[in-house]
Amino acid sequence: MNISGIVDWILLHPIQYPGRHNHQQQRTLSIYRDLTTKDQFLLVINSLKELLQDCYSKGNSLHIHNFGTFSFEFIGPTSQAIPIKQSTQLKQLPKLYQNIRPCFIVDPYLQKQLSRYSQKDEINKSRGVGSIYNQGHATQFCNPQTLSNMCYVDKLTIESILKTFTQAINDLIRMGHDVNLDFGLSIINVKNKNLQYMFDEKFVNFMNQPEFTDNFLKSKPITCNIWKNEKSIQDKNLNEIYFAPCSPYSLVTNQKTKNLMNIKDMTSVQK
């Protein structure tokens, strides 16, 4: 069952999946025509695909609640993940450790419906990660407001669509249905409760190009050498950034102020 089939399943069971997605909603921008219930559902899913592509192009991961996280890991010749905290020094790592592999981290809620899924620990979680959603490198939560701005559908409808879509996927897998989800850059296939995924080959090759790996660097040169080597900073000083006041003008102004204060004191004494 593909994405379109899942949408039809949801709309055929309004009692099981109640919400705003079962009714035609007005667009947030009046110049766009109103869509049918299925069309607005598919529009949000297509916007989700574009959001995934945008997150990956910036070097971020995307987490979808109750579904999973589209992320990546840094691997070496021994196929062991490099700690994420070292990713900021990617330029200083040996070339053997600069391979990047995209991956999909199954959400714990979806794991309960599956019997098999590849590599239960996709990546080595870095220390100090506070958020439960930050399961990959620079994980971004799927924000309904962002999707609302992309497809001009109100936020409440977006929340209803995302919640119902992920719930329907879990229900169909639990009931033994096969699911084939095409997210553009990634295809997730569930057959006999066995989850497998694949990524676009061209995108995987692009992830290991300098145009993509530069996204992981907070600063390309080492921070301690910026002030020594950067000529644009080395030649500057505070006098060039903040102009000092003219000294003769300041002296005259200060003197006038003092004279006024003296006159005021003299008049008060005479009274």
Image (cartoon, helix red, strand yellow):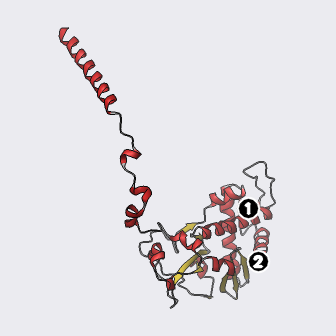
Asked if residue 52 shows in the view, the reply is yes
Q: Which mark is residue 190?
A: none
Disc with the residue nearer the chain's start (2 vs 1): 2
Residue at the spot of label 2? 2
Query: From what the image shows, is residue 255 above or below residue 78?
Result: above
Secondary structure under tag 1 reads helix
Secondary structure beneath label 2:
loop
Horizontal side of residue 238 vs 75, given as left or right: left
Answer left or right for 93 relative to 38: left
* Residue 133 seen in the current view: no
* Residue located at (31% from left, 33% from top): 247
Q: Are marks 2 and 1 in contact (CB under 8 Å)?
A: no
Q: Residues within 10 Å of mark 1 (few under 14, many from 20)?
A: many
The N terminus lies in which quarter of the figure? bottom right
Pinpoint residue 238: horizontal percent, then vertical percent.
Answer: 36, 47
Q: Residue at x 72, y 64 (%)?
A: 44
Where does the image place residue 263, in percent across and percent down from the top left?
Answer: 24, 15
C-alpha gap between disc 2 and disc 1: 19 Å
